[in-house]
Amino acid sequence: MAEKEHSERAVRDFFWNIVELHSHLEEIHKGWGQMLGISEPQWLILMAIDELDEGRGVSGIAVANKLRIHPAFVTNQTKKLESLELLARLPSPDDGRFLQMSLTEKARAGITALSITRTAVNSTIFAELDEESLRYLNQRLISIAKNSRLAAQKLSLGIL
């Protein structure tokens, strides 16, 4: 694919829009967490586990990779979530040295209780986008995220 030229203004606008969007989403996640009596990072950990769990539990590494955070932070926070009875941490059936995490019924009930409000918030956020537009936007964001990872790697290696 040939390199595309983009105006500096359009690129700067994009970055500032992402910064603003991130800030608003952080506030929304903080609010969801507060409704369950947990922090914003703990809320995101619960959401990552909910997203990744296919019935066998989820490793801390998988959660850390999904959220792009350090595995030690996940371990620390999941211990707290376990003490609040929102998470179950059990040895992996494949390798007892590793833990598999899953949401408890208490966590599922709390998340379910928020579902109507979460649907309303999502409807507000995406009010001007139909499903096809949202799918297209997600495809573009996936591409930008992939290219951003590549650019970050190149920059850290000094090859840009």
Image (tube, rainbow, N blue to C red):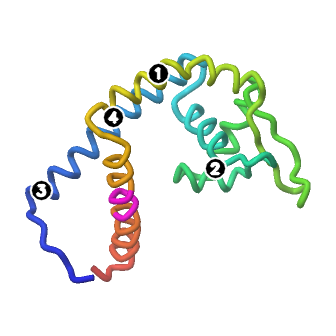
Disc marking residue 126? 4
Q: Secondary structure at mark 2?
A: helix
- What's the residue at 81%, 35% (across, down)? 88
Q: Nearer the viewer, residue 147 or 140?
A: 140
Calculate the distance from the C-alpha at mark 3 to the C-alpha at mark 4.
22 Å
Q: Nearer the viewer, residue 36 or 129?
A: 129
Camera-side mark, 1 or 4: 4
Task: Tell me if label 1 and label 4 are in contact, CB under 8 Å.
Answer: no
Give the residue pinned by disc 1.
Answer: 31
Residue type at tag 4: Phe
**Lower sequence index among marks 1 and 3:** 3
- Residue 27 in the image: above or below residue 8: above
**Lower sequence index among marks 1 and 4:** 1
Residue type at tag 3: Ala
Give the residue pinned by disc 3.
Answer: 10
Camera-side mark, 3 or 4: 4
Q: Secondary structure at mark 1?
A: helix
Q: Secondary structure at mark 3?
A: helix
Quadrant location of the N terminus in the rendered image: bottom left
- What's the residue at 81%, 49% (across, down)? 56
Residue type at tag 1: Gly
Task: Tell me if label 1 and label 3 are in contact, CB under 8 Å.
Answer: no
Q: Secondary structure at mark 4?
A: loop
Camera-side mark, 2 or 4: 4
Give the residue pinned by disc 2.
Answer: 63
- What's the residue at 58%, 56% (across, down)? 65
Residue range in magenta is 139-143
Calculate the distance from the C-alpha at mark 1 to the C-alpha at mark 4.
18 Å
